[in-house]
Image (tube, coloured by chain):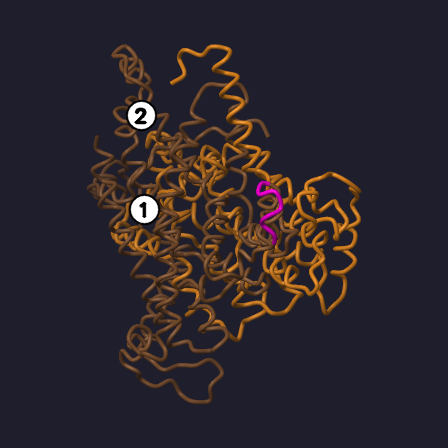
Chain colours: A brown, B orange
Amino acid sequence: MTSVEPAHTALPGPEQAPSTSVKPAPSTRSTRPGRKNRDWLHGLLMSAPAVVGLIAFVGVPFGYAVVLSFYNVRLGSPLEPTWFGIEQYRRLFTDPNLSGPFLRALLNNLTFAAVVVPVQTALALALAILLNRKLKAIGFFRSLFFMPVVFPMALVAVIWRLILARSDQGMLNSALDAVSFGNWGAFDWLGDGATAMGSIIVLSIWQGVGFQMVILLAGLQQIPGELYEAAELDRASRWQQFRHVTLPGIRGTLVFVAMLTSVLSFRVFDQVYVLVRGGGLDEDATRTVMYQAVTTAFDQNNIGQASAITVVFFLIVVVLTLIQRRVVRPGNED
Amino acid sequence: MGTTSTPLRRFLDYAVLSVLAFVFVLPVIYLFLGSLKPSDEVLNGLSGFLPTNLSFDNYTAVLDSLNSDSTGYFWRFMGVSLLLAFVVVTGGLFVNSMAAYGLSRLKWRGRNAVFTLVLLLMLVPFESVAVPLFYMFNDQRNTLYILALPFIANAFSVYQFHTFFRSIPPSIEEAARIDGAGPWRTFFAIIVPMSKPAFASVAILTFLIQWGSFLWPVLMISDPSVRPLPLEMSVFQGQQPPDWGQILAFGVLLVLPVLIVFAFFQRWFVQGVASSAVKG
């Protein structure tokens, strides 16, 4: 491993793509006289496989999820699906007997996002600033911090299962024991309801922070060096440089990264599933919305309710994405 | 920054970076060291970090213990994962780049509507269609093709190619088409060869995501003969009592292919990942 160069691709707002491709269509027809223009046919044929695939595996199932969420439908049940109205949603949100696990999952997800978004973004920014300098072997250091990003989450969960193992021989427990001169002993980080979510948060940040770091690094490198030179001529301190040059320079990227992290926060599933199934993780303290959707569909065969959870999940993600697009746009203009 | 760098300052920079990086990669060191140690020495307090009694015994033990119809075969898990990655990456490059070309360089009525549809579908994360897909394809569970099929057409890949193709000057194609090349030949003989960076970064990002893919196999696969590696990681670590040396050796074998790709194609990796940020 020698170097990780930050991507120099600017972050284009996706919304600019369709608008710029609107061009007067007939003009091409006139540029090639004497040649029959069949571009419409070729264009259609070329885009057909991907577009059909997307409709079949994204569009249709998504619409189907909305429909299923209004039915009482169970997998493997001999009964026909019956119309349920908004009963599934009522059960998820207001039924005193049934809404408990889902509301807990929603709360857990919010907690996860509320901690991970600021902490991971700040950490990524600190790393990006630290790694944004011209030193020999800086690429090597960047690679090290980026490396966990390529680790499958199922493996990350297993590594941390060992680090956080409950016995006094667990890595974290014995490290704490050593620094406290033998006063620590054993603590069940994953199994204790008070620390279970904290454990998931730590391992998730470890795996994901390199990703945010790389994006922020690309943002930092777009700040013109003259700005820092001017600031130094003005005898600005390092902190003042950070406040008045760095932060304004990457404001757009920073907001973008924060919003992106918040969307990713709601997609958490793999690490919770792996550790609940085999690692003694406290289930109630760490169940997430996706975990709830999967267990409802898979273990309880309750497709209708799982679809309703899916729809709620999608609405959260869309709202976050729309906020992201709205907030990032002014940042890109300056 | 860092215009005035004295030797002392540089030394401090390196010291801070080294300490931080070391702490950060401790879990990785632990993974690799533990995979080489006898199982009862892995979960053994801080001495789990001592490189003592190293051997490849755990690796041969993994291959031995995952070697029957009831447990599944290690090389079969690996084969399933490699096959899926190959199909999803190559199939995806083919259909998504072609679609992006049709939507960016050929002008036809309705293409803006189709591209807008692609952009809208890009907003739908796989997680929100997993449940209905699970229901729709329930009678196809435990088949290989259903693991790959939903991931070949990818709205974000189309978008990435679209962005790249739009930056190609039109004169290049015009020349080809005046020479009599149709859109297909123009695409495969001229556009594809000059778009290697786009293909590389889309391929690597797709590979990375596919290699770790977990949610869909959890829903669709119970039969060990078609189980991909990450799902088997979850099954294998759940054994009672856990054999830590073997579990970590399995983990190393799981991450090795993606680490090798990472080591060789880092630039594309980081570019692909950073550009994936656009998706949100």
Observer-nearest of B155 and A218: A218
Q: Is residue A180 magenta?
A: yes
Which type of secondary structure does the marked residue at label 2 adopt? Answer: helix
| Residue drawn where x is 69% and y is 60% of the image | B242
The kind of residue on which mark 2 rests is Phe
Which chain letter goes with mark 1? A
* Discs 2/1, front: 2
Label drawn at residue A259: 1
Name above or below for residue A253 compared with residue B247: above
Prevailing SS of the magenta stretch: loop
Q: CA distance from mark 2 to mark 1?
A: 22 Å
Q: Quadrant of residue A166?
A: bottom right
Instruction: Tell me which segment is drawn in magenta.
Output: A179-185
Q: Is residue B136 left or right of residue B211?
A: left
Q: Is residue B262 magenta?
A: no
Observer-nearest of B110 and B275: B275
Which type of secondary structure does the marked residue at label 1 adopt? Answer: helix
Residue B116 shows up from this direction: yes
Disc 2 crowd, CA 10 A, few/some/many (<14, 14-19, 20+): some
Q: Position of residue B42 (x, y in %)?
A: 70, 49
Residue lying at the far bottom in this picture: please name it: A79
Label drawn at residue A242: 2
Q: Position of residue A99 (x, y in %)?
A: 35, 74
Which chain letter goes with mark 2? A
